[in-house]
Amino acid sequence: MTMNALDKSAAAAARECDGLPEPASHTPGPWRVSDSNGHGDLFIAAEGDRNALVLALMLSPLPSENSYGCVRANANLIASAPALLEACRRAFDCLCRLEVDGTQDDIDALDAAIAQATGE
């Protein structure tokens, strides 16, 4: 079941600075990017034990330096997701406690990013 934009807006308004939702049930970080096969393909895995869980495989569409750079940049962004989500949660909490005029747009942006990352 997906929420429409009005439902999402209402959920965000109800949650405004009243506390963050429970952490998402995603694979905990940190995640890392590794070369998978030497052909420009990369995989993103959860760090931890030797049997790391592979979360995503990034395939290089063309065997060129430019495509590898783009695939690497996308993989790095995906691998940073747990850390970025945690930073957003902390910034949201901090902004809510500051109660400084002019921060509502920032609070709303963080709230939207957290909702997107957690599938709300």
Image: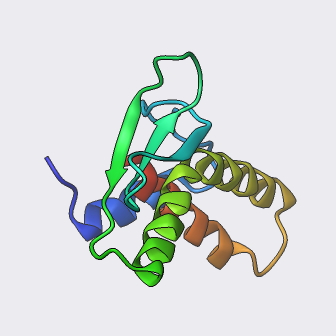
Q: Which residue is found at the position 38% from the left and 47% from the top?
A: 37
Q: Is residue 42 above or below residue 70?
A: above
Query: Image quarter for residue 49?
Result: top right
Which residue in the rendered view is the most extreme toward the left? 1
Percent position (x, y) of residue 51?
Answer: 46, 17
Q: Which residue is found at the position 69% from the left and 56% from the top?
A: 92
Percent position (x, y) of residue 108?
Answer: 57, 69
Percent position (x, y) of residue 89?
Answer: 65, 49
- Relative placement, left or right, of 11 versus 83 is left
- Relative placement, left or right, of 95 versus 3 is right
Percent position (x, y) of residue 7?
Answer: 28, 60
Query: Image quarter for residue 86?
Result: top right
- Relative placement, left or right, of 65 versus 41 is right
Q: Is residue 120 visible?
A: no
Q: Which residue is found at the position 33% from the left and 49% from the top?
A: 57
Q: Which residue is found at the position 70% from the left and 52% from the top?
A: 87
Q: Is residue 68 above or below residue 92?
A: below
Q: Nearer the viewer, residue 74 or 98?
A: 74
Q: Nearer the viewer, residue 35 or 24?
A: 35
